[in-house]
Amino acid sequence: MDERLRDLISQVCQYEIASLERQQALNRLLRAIAQLPGIYKSSHQDYPEAFNRTLEWVCKNIDRFEVNSPSVQKSFVVWINGYLKWRIRDLYIPDDRYSFITSNDADGAIDLIESIPDPKFSIGLLDLKIAEMQATKLERQGLLIKQYIERDPENILSTCHLRKDSQCHCHLLASRLLIAEPPQSIADVSRELNVNNQTIYSHWKQKCLPLLQEIARRFGDLPQ
C-alpha cells in the first residue's frame, strides 16, 4: 500500500491545478483513501458531510503532504485524521458529545479517541460513506468526462490528429493516457504507433489538452 499511495500522490502533484490529468489522478487517490484502515469514523448521521469536507481539503492541500514516518500510509492517515477529527468534533458541538473510532491500523490495533459508545454504529457504515463519497461533485464530474472521452460523441477528439498520421488522434491518446487502468505513458503509445515520442508529446500538450479542458468545462466549474 505504501508504494501505491506514494505513486498516487506523486501522480496528482505532477500535474497543474485544475488540469484534467490532475482531476483524474485525484479521483484515483480518493478511491484509495476510502479503503485506508485507520481513518476516523463516527456514527453521527452527518458524518458523510464531515468526510466529504475532508476529501475536499485533501484535494486542495495534497501538495503540502509530507511523509513523517517510515510508512507513507501511516503518515497519510495521520495527516487526514488531523483535519477529519475536527470536522467530526464540529458535528457534536451542539450536544457537547464527541465520539471517534478508527478501524484497524497498520499494526492491527484499535484506537479509541474520546469514545462514547453508540449502539447505532454498524460495520456497514464505511460502505455507506464510500458510496456517498463517490457521489460527490468531483466524482460525478470525473465520470461524465470519462464517459465523454470513451464515446467521443461529436468526433471532436478522433478528428484532431497528427497531420502525417491520422491514427495518432486525441481520442486514442486520451483513452490510453487518462482512462486506461493503469494509464499508459506517451512512450508506450510511441512504441505502439511507431511515432516519435516528442511528436506525440507536442500534439498532446498543444492540441489534445486544450481540447479536453474545453470539453471538461461543460461538466463542471473548471476555470475559464
Image: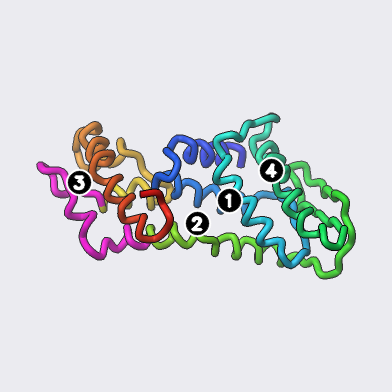
Whether the magenta-drawn stretch holds residue 41 is answered as no
Can you identify the residue that label 3 sits on? 168
Residue corresponding to mark 1: 56
Which structural element holds mark 4? Answer: helix
Mark 3 belongs to which amino acid? Cys
What's the amino acid at mark 4?
A: Val
Q: Which is nearer the N-term, disc 3 or disc 2?
A: 2
Left/right of residue 216 with respect to residue 154 in the rendered view? right
SS of the residue under disc 3: strand
- Disc sitting over residue 77 in the figure: 4
Q: Residue at x 43, y 38 (%)?
A: 15
Q: Is residue 175 visible?
A: yes
Residue stretch rendered in magenta on the structure: 147-170
First in residue order: circle 2 vs circle 4:
4
Quadrant assignment for the N terminus:
top right
Q: Are marks 1 and 2 in contact (CB under 8 Å)?
A: yes
